[in-house]
Amino acid sequence: MKNIKKLLGIMMAATVLVGCGKSSDDTVQDSSPGAGQTVEESKEEDAAAFGEKTVAENPLSDETKAKLDALDTNYKKVNWDAVYSAPDNEGIVISETAYFDKQDSLHNILVVAYTNVSDQAVKFSCEGYIENASGDVVADIFESDVELGPNNTIAIKYDSEYDEPSGNVRWNNFSVEPSDKEYVPYEINTELTKKDQFYYIEATYSSDSEIDSMFMPMGYGYVLDKDGHIIGGGEEESIPGDTVNTWAETYEGENADTVFFKNIYNH
C-alpha cells in the first residue's frame, strides 16, 4: 500500500512539472498586450495625422469645400495630404503634401498650394513656420504680394532639409487684398522630357487672349506618381519661362504624370 501511495505521489508531481513547462513556453510566444507587435500598433494609432493640428484650427466651410470640388484644374490631379482654409480668409484654400527629394537635394520637401476659390483676382502675403512632429520649427514661409487669379493655384516648394515636416504650420498672418491685374484664362499642357542627363517639365499655353510673356510670374511644375503624390519638381528658373529642371536623372519608372501651376496676367 505504501508503495502504491509513493507511486501516485511521483505521478502527481510529474504532472505538475509538465503543466509548468507548458505555461513557460506559452509566455515566450505570448502576443497579448505588452508584446512588441501590439506596442508598435499602439504607437502608430497614437501618431498624429499629417497637418492635423493646423487643419483643425482652420477648417473648410461647406461652401468652400463645394467650390474646391468644382475646380477642373491641375490642382485636382495632386493627392494632397492636408487641406484647410487660410487663417481668417475663406476665399483662399491651403493644401499641403510632403515628399523626400532623393533625386535632387536628398532633403525633405513640403509643397504648399494656395488656391483662390473666389471669382476675383487677389494678391496675398503671409508668414508661417513649418513644424516637425515635435513642434520644432524646421523651415520658414515668407511670401509677399503673390498674385492669384480666380479659381487658380500656385504651389510653392519649401525645403526643410533633414527634418521631416509634420504638415502643421504656425501661421502668424495671412493677408489678402484685391488685385489690379487683368488675368488671362488659359489652358496648359505639360510634358516630362530629358535633356542631357536631367529631366525637365515643359509647359505650353493656349488662350483666346493674347499672352504677353513679360507678365508671366514664376511657375511651379511637379512630377506625380500613379497615385497623384508629388515625387519631384520645383520652380521655374527664369522669366519668361515654361520649363522646370527637376535635377533628376531617373524616377525609376515611378513618374506617371506632371502638373504645372502658373498665374498669367496682361499688365
Image: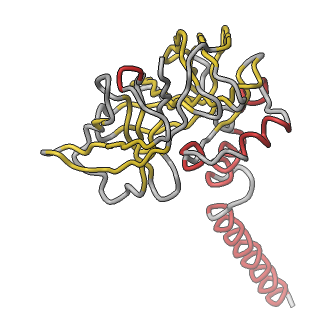
Q: Residue at x 38, y 41 (%)?
A: 232
- Left or right, 91 with respect to 96, comes to right
- Image-based side of 51 in relation to 10, left or right: left
Q: Residue at x 76, y 75 (%)?
A: 13
Residue 218 located left or right of residue 133: left
112 or 118, nearer to the observer = 118
- Viewer-nearest residue: 188 or 230: 188
Q: Viewer-proximal residue, 248 or 44?
A: 248
Residue 91, located in which quarter of the rendered image? top right
Residue extending furthest toward the left: 196
Q: How is the image coloured?
A: secondary structure
Tell me: residue 2, above or below residue 166: below
Residue 41 location (% of width, % of height): 67, 50
Locate residue 147, reporting x and y percent: 55, 19
Residue 56 image position (x, y, % from top left)? 78, 29
Q: Is 130 rendered above or below residue 223?
A: above
Q: Is residue 182 left or right of residue 84?
A: left
Q: Position of residue 103 (x, y in %)?
A: 29, 41
Q: Is residue 175 above or below residue 41?
A: above
Residue 12, by quadrant, is bottom right
Residue at the spot 67% in from the left edge and 13% down from the top edge: 178
Tally of numbered tags: 0
Q: Residue 113's image quarter?
A: top right
